[in-house]
Amino acid sequence: MATIPPEAFYLSPDATGTLQQQIRGMVAQGVLAGRFRPGQRMPSSRGLAAHLGVSRITVTLAYGDLVASDYLTSSGRSGYFVSETAPLAPELPEGPPRAEAVDFRALTGGRFSGTARVERPEDWDRYPYPFIYGQADPTLFDHQNWRQCALRALGKRDFAALTSDYYDRDDPLLVQELIRTILPRRGIAAREDEVLLTLGAQNALWMVATLLLGPGRRAVVENPGYPGWRAVVTAVGAEVMAVDVDALGLPVPPLAGADVVFVTPSHQCPTNATMPVERRVALLEAAEREGFIIVEDDYEFEMSFLHPVAPALKSLDRDGRVIYAGSFSKSVFPGLRLGYLVGPPGFIAEARALRGLMLKHPPGHIQRTMAYFLGLGHYDALVNRMKGAFRRRRQAMAEAIAAEGLEVAGQGGFGGSSFWMRAPEGVDTETLALALRAEGVLIEPGRAFFAGGGPGNLYRLAYSSIPLPRVAEGVARIARALG
């Protein structure tokens, strides 16, 4: 059978992974696609290395890995061949032409796909001035220690944590680390039966809304506020009661008729206001008086680097009216998709049962990796590094904003990772955002944060992902676009 020519292989400039991984992937894909047939001889390691411009040892290691996976076999001096027992893609009969006879958007009412959200390009990291919120900065992340924790969680000692079906339970090691290291910093004392792990804060809020709301029930949302909470309230059929925030966050007017009140007291989303303790106490008293439940999203509390963080609402709760939601998305990385709920045992038991119907539990390997990252002190070191970097970027951005004469609508006094900005009257920041993309600048228009639409001249500038040396020029470009 003919030898596969080296010309059948090429390295794409956009490919990811090491050279060895790319070569392995090309061979595996060729076998699975049927281009390389069982028994065919592979190019010699020397010949393929010369064709690709890589070292011979790189090709030899890739071939050895493919032999171990049974894609190739080695026949001594004769070289490498496609294995007779290599995995093959299933040969499926060609189906009939596809047609979309059902209008699924009409069938579902578009109640999920039509919700407002903050838009950003998928390739945001290719822009030189990305003032966007919530993305991880690879220059700050602790790659080495996270990798070591992940490898440790893959070991034989943790085989059960990696492979077992927990059913509706969680990794006890991670739960203990939460109870021991994270929650006490918020003044929260919790037991195991008061904690539930989730796939991030959004998953947590969906479960809360599903359990506590529905048709005929009312939920207070901050205005402007987090679009994700407003979307799930609408999706479960509850009535949205939008309450305008002020410089101190959610005010406490009469909330008669509310069943659930959602609040972001540590860093109001998106204005960054921090609710004072006196208002937190007043909100708890109103909850007891009016009989509603409070959902506290305590995102970004770790980034209070200007002043000590205020106590969580949950820490002041004496009769179990606060459901607390936390997440590692902002402090570790958003792709981790790991968060948690803290609440009375009766609520957590019901939330656990609901989660069991949806996804059982977050992946065991992710849970155990996070437990080691916390327990070995790497999390605290990462947060400390981020706070120092954010403090410097915030100072640079404040100076650049002042120098360019831009208007800050809300910045918060405790830290965080963004500024809430106001453009001149008559400026539509959605149009502004599109124009700035051509200049390499990304901003977040503010209209999506408002219930029923709001002022078109507000926008958010985050400094979590933009390198410090680029802050001043990025702000200058915004000023020129507004000028």
Image (spheres, rainbow, N blue to C red):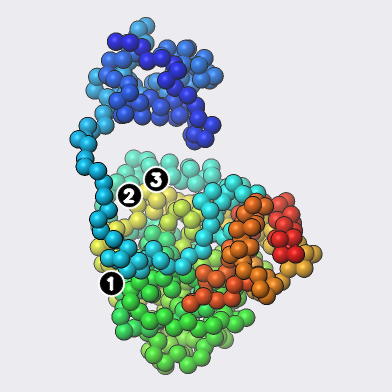
Task: Give the spatial CA distance, label 3 vs label 2.
Answer: 8 Å
Residue at position x 68%, y 75% in the image: 425
104 vs 113, nearest the viewer = 104
**Quadrant of residue 229 within the rendered picture:** bottom left
Q: Position of residue 452 (x, y in %)?
A: 48, 77
**Looking at this rendering, what residue extends furthest in the right direction?**
403
Amino acid at circle 2: Ala
Residue 446 locus on image (x, y percent):
57, 69
The numbered dot on residue 350 is 1
Distance in Å between CA atoms under marks 1 and 2 = 24 Å
Q: Which mark is residue 423?
A: none
Quadrant location, the C terminus: bottom right
- Quick one: label 2, few (<14), some, or many (20+) residues within 10 Å? many
The residue type indicated by label 3 comes to Ala
Q: Can residue 214 be seen at all in this image of the molecule?
A: yes
Question: Residue 453: x percent and y percent?
Answer: 51, 75
Q: Residue at x 52, y 14 (%)?
A: 50
Binning the other alpha carbons within 10 Å of mark 1 as few (below 14), some (14 to 19) or many (20 upward) gives: some
**Most foreground residue, 401 or 300:** 401
Residue at 25% from the left image edge and 58% from the top image edge: 102
Label 3 crowd (10 A; few <14 / some 14-19 / many >=20) = many
Q: Secondary structure at mark 3?
A: helix
Left/right placement of residue 337 relative to residue 446 reads: left
Select label 1 or label 3 by which is in front: 1
Query: Residue tagged by mark 3?
Result: 153
Q: Earlier in the sequence, mark 3 or mark 2?
A: 3
First in sequence: mark 1 vs mark 2: 2
Q: Is residue 432 left or right of residue 79?
A: right
What type is the residue that disc 1 sits on? Glu
Q: Are marks 1 and 2 in contact (CB under 8 Å)?
A: no
Q: Secondary structure at mark 2?
A: helix
